[in-house]
Image: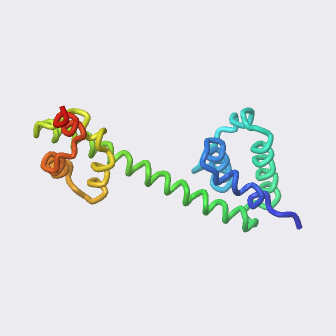
């Protein structure tokens, strides 16, 4: 018996690029099309290798449906990736709002505009530690983490 195309093309589907994302959407659409819509107009822009992957997977699904264990395993991996990507997007959204609040707090404390962006790693670590933006702003001022202050002291 030939290897399932869901196993053959797994690396393409799970890649970290836009066409791979579309292939994941295709796999999820085959599984639960009403919940996971995919635009088929993308097919015209696929290179030969990715078009072959898409058509191979669709043909296999037509023949075997959900009875292919490789298909169901890939669905699970695609769902997990989708959840991870959503969690990362949610975190980034919360972090951006937190950074805006920290920037406002810094301005109120006399900090320099743009300090959060310039010290992003420090502030994102404070976010991850669960600090409130105002507390992080006070700590940043007290610790003198602003690189612009060091430049001013060298003059």
Along the line of sight, the residue nearer the viewer: 19 or 65: 19
Return the x and y of residue 38 as percentages of the image width and height.
64, 43
**66 w.r.t. 108: above or below:** below
Along the line of sight, the residue nearer the viewer: 109 or 143: 143
Residue 26 located left or right of residue 137: right
Residue 18 located left or right of residue 103: right
Seen at 80% across and 62% down, the residue is: 4
**83 w.r.t. 45: above or below:** below
**71 w.r.t. 151: above or below:** below
Return the x and y of residue 93 as percentages of the image width and height.
36, 45
> To which quarter of the image does residue 10 belong?
bottom right
Seen at 18% across and 48% down, the residue is: 140
- Where's the C terminus, which quadrant? top left
Return the x and y of residue 61 as percentages of the image width and height.
77, 56
> To which quarter of the image does residue 17 belong?
top right
Seen at 49% across and 56% down, the residue is: 84
- The extreme left residue here reads 109
């Amino acid at each position: 018996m030939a290897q399932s195309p869901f196993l053959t093309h797994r690396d393409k589907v799970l890649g970290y690029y836009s066409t791979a994302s579309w292939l994941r959407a295709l796999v999820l659409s085959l599984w639960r099309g009403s919940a996971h819509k995919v635009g088929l107009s993308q097919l015209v822009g696929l290179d030969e290798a990715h078009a072959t992957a898409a058509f191979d997977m669709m043909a296999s699904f037509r023949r075997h449906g959900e009875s292919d264990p490789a298909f169901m395993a890939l669905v699970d991996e695609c769902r997990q990736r989708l959840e991870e990507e959503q969690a990362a997007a949610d975190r980034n959204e919360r972090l951006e709002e937190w950074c805006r609040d920290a920037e406002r707090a810094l301005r109120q404390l006399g900090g320099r505009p743009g300090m959060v962006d310039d010290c992003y790693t420090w502030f994102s670590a404070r976010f991850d530690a669960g600090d409130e933006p105002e507390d992080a702003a006070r700590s940043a001022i007290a610790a003198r983490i602003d690189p612009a202050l060091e430049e001013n002291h060298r003059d």
